[in-house]
Amino acid sequence: MAGFSTVLIADDDQNDVFFLRRAFQKSGLSHRLFEVQDGQQAVDYLSGLPPFQDRSQYPLPSLLLLDLKMPKMTGFEVLSWLKTQPALQQIPVVVLSGSNQVRDVEQARSLGAAEYHVKPADFDDLLKFVRDLDVKWLATPSPQQRPA
């Protein structure tokens, strides 16, 4: 799958994960999508702790899509942890939250989130969001640029 990126989705809402996966698929994007259901699993994945220790099977992501309201560790706690991990600083984090509270946006940005978005309610908006992510963070080559 050379030329395609790995995206880690950290979200405890399986419906949101389902629609994100569907939006990537409908957009024709073939990135490898991995999901974790809580903040602790996100940290374990990024740290390469079991069951995520095999980097050939669980590669470091090119992008982390992070929900804020999750069990075990919140998205804010994951962002705080990431700030202490120099080896992971290059991974952009896009917060995708149900909250449109200004204080949540400000806190996420102050903890290092590259972007903050409220989860789109409409599937067409989700498709646009995923395509924008691809262009901005994942840089999929156009079909003409892809190797045959």
Image (cartoon, grey):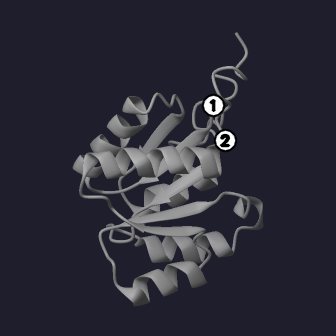
Is residue 43 toward the left or the right of residue 26 in the image? right
Q: Which residue reaches farthest bottom?
A: 103
Q: Residues within 10 Å of mark 1 (few under 14, many from 20)?
A: some
Q: Position of residue 19 (x, y in %)?
A: 29, 43
Residue in the foreground of this view, choosing between 29 and 8? 29
Amino acid at dot 2: Ala
Q: Is residue 116 above or below residue 91?
A: below
- Residue at 45% x, 55% y: name it: 41
- CA–CA distance in space, label 2 to label 1: 9 Å
Element on which disc 1 rests: loop
Q: Position of residue 21 (x, y in %)?
A: 37, 38
* Image-quadrant location for residue 119: bottom left
**N-terminal-most mark, 2 or 1:** 1
- Residue at 39% x, 71% y: name it: 68
Q: Position of residue 133 (x, y in %)?
A: 54, 50
Q: Is residue 24 above or below residue 93?
A: above
Residue in the foreground of this view, choosing between 94 and 61? 94
Question: Depth-wise, is mark 2 or mark 1 nearer the camera?
Answer: 2
Residue annotated with mark 2? 139
Amino acid at dot 1: Phe
Q: Residues within 10 Å of mark 2 (few under 14, many from 20)?
A: few
Residue in the foreground of this view, choosing between 38 and 9? 9
- Residue at 63% x, 31% y: name it: 4
What quarter of the picture does the C terminus occupy?
A: top right
Residue annotated with mark 1? 4
Residue in the foreground of this view, choosing between 123 and 61? 123
Q: Which residue reaches farthest right?
A: 86
